[in-house]
Amino acid sequence: AYKTGALARMAAKIGAIIAGAQENDVEKIAEFAECVGVAFQIQDDILNIMAGKKWGKEFGEDIKEGKRTLLVIHTLQNADEREKKRLLEILNMHTGETKLLQEAIDIIKKYDSMEYAKNYARQLVENSWNKIDKILPDSGAKTKLRMFANFAVEREF
C-alpha cells in the first residue's frame, strides 16, 4: 500500500479532482487505484517465485532479498514449526543458491500460499471495483479500466 499502491492512489486522486469529482467519489476512486496497485504487487510477488524468461527478472529474487511478502506471511501463519523455522532461515540467508530458493518455494507452495495470495488480490480488486462501479458512468473508458484492473491480477509477466 505504501509503495505501488500509494503512487496509484495519488495519480487517480489527482485525476478525479481535475475531473471535478465529488470529494466522496474522489476517495473511492483513489482507494480503487490503491487496491489495484497492491494487487499488482501481490501478482508480482507470485510471478517472482515462478519466474522464467518471459518474466525477465531473477528467479526467487524476493526470497534472496528476504522479503516478507504476503506469500511468506501466509506460509508462516500456517506452516508447522519446523517449516516456519526453515523458511525464515532461508530468507535470512539472502542466498541466491537455486536449491535453497527452491526449498523455500516448495514450503510456500505446500501451504497453498500462492493461491491464497492470488485470491486475496482478486478480492481486493473486486471489492474496490464494486465501490466505483456505481459512480462511474458506463463508457469505453470504464470497460478498459475494469479490464486493466483484472489484468493487474491475472497477468503472467
Image (spheres, helix red, strand yellow):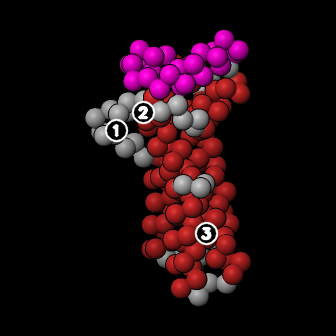
The residue sitting at the bottom extreme is 20
Marks 2 and 3 in Cβ contact (< 8 Å): no
Marks 3 and 1 in Cβ contact (< 8 Å): no
Q: Which residue is mark 2?
A: 61
Q: Main secondary structure of the magenta part?
A: helix
Label 1: which secondary element: loop
Q: Which residue is mark 3?
A: 30
Look at the image and say whether residue 136 sits in the magenta stretch: no
- Other residues around mark 1 within 10 Å, as few (<14) / some (14–19) / many (≥20): few
Marks 2 and 1 in Cβ contact (< 8 Å): yes
Which residue shows up at 47% across the image and 52% down it? 152
Tell me: residue 111, above or below residue 135: above
Tell me: residue 128, above or below residue 133: above
Closer to the N terminus: mark 3 or mark 1? 3
In the rendered structure, find residue 15 and report the number of the disc placed on it.
none
The residue sitting at the left extreme is 53
Which residue shows up at 39% across the image and 19% down it? 97
> Which residue range is magenta in the image?
80-104
Is the N terminus in the top left, top right, bottom left or bottom right quadrant?
Answer: bottom right
Q: Which residue is mark 1?
A: 57
Whether residue 125 is visible to the viewer of this picture, yes or no, is no
Q: Is residue 128 left or right of residue 40?
A: right
Label 3: which secondary element: helix
Distance from Cα at disc 3 to Cα at disc 1: 29 Å
- Image position, residue 6 (x, y; %): 57, 61
Which residue shows up at 52% across the image and 78% down it? 15
